[in-house]
Amino acid sequence: IADAQMIKYASNAYLASRISFINEVASICESVGADISTVAGAMGLDPRIGSSYLSPGIGFGGPCLEKDLDALIGFARDHQYEPGYLTVVRARNDQQVGSILSRAREMLGGSVAGKKISVLGLAFKTGTNDVRTSLSLRIVRSLTDAGALVTGHDPVAIEEAKLILPDVDYSADLYESLEGSDLAMILTGWPEYRLLDPEKLKATMGVARVLDGQNLLDPDVIRRAGIEYRGIGR
């Protein structure tokens, strides 16, 4: 039984650690002027490493990685072992969420209060309507608590998000959700967001700013359209 528990917990804790690691590397890339897309792509070519779970972003959420990491930390402590490395992985994930919120404030002049923010992506990952422990919803809650006017969009997860955050505005139409917005935040990597038309985006938003939390967009293309852009590790 102990082996079975450890296999499940350790597998997901390892994947969580890769995400925290690449987000830390992305932050270093920003400091030294490197591009995380190039760095992570080259790392993934090494067969000892591989490319899975090396995409920087807003961190890990959902019903598996976060839950099993916390379970392994608790399991260890229940048996009088302090898992220092795992607690750092967990703390780094929380730090990443804080970093996303800080970037939003910076792009809006220091405060999100009274600003209209379009959050693109509510599910914890693509291909699902699951919003359990979604970091997107955690970010939305923090934004609204700080006085932001949030409109949420997701191809499949709006109804599920409404059950958790019923007081937030939602729109099933992508460009309608961007209407008059001061900032668009891409928080889930849906392919629809990769196909955003820069000119239409600029014309639709009140002030054309994009915080790309999944590095879906080409920064050069977006900036050439006159849109302020900020990604992760770029």
Image (cartoon, rainbow, N blue to C red):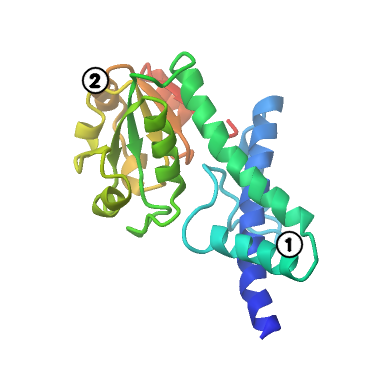
**Residue tagged by mark 2?**
203
User: Element type at marker 2?
Assistant: helix
Q: Is residue 33 visible?
A: no
**Residue tagged by mark 1?**
48
Residue 178 lies, in percent from the top left, at 26, 29
Residue 217 lies, in percent from the top left, at 43, 35
Tell me the residue at 60%/46% (across/down): 93
Query: Foreground mark, 1 or 2?
Result: 2
23 vs 224: above or below? below
Where residue 182 sits, quadrant-wise, is top left
Q: Is residue 211 left or right of residue 205?
A: right
161 vs 79: above or below? above
The residues tagged by marks 1 and 2 sit, at their Cα atoms, a distance apart of 46 Å
Identity of the amino acid at label 1? Arg
Q: Is residue 152 left or right of residue 4?
A: left
Tell me the residue at 64%/78% (across/down): 5
Quadrant assignment for the N terminus: bottom right
Label 1 CA crowd tier, 10 Å (few <14, some 14–19, many 20+): few
Q: Is residue 200 left or right of residue 98?
A: left
Residue 102 lies, in percent from the top left, at 53, 26
| Front residue of 191 and 122 | 122
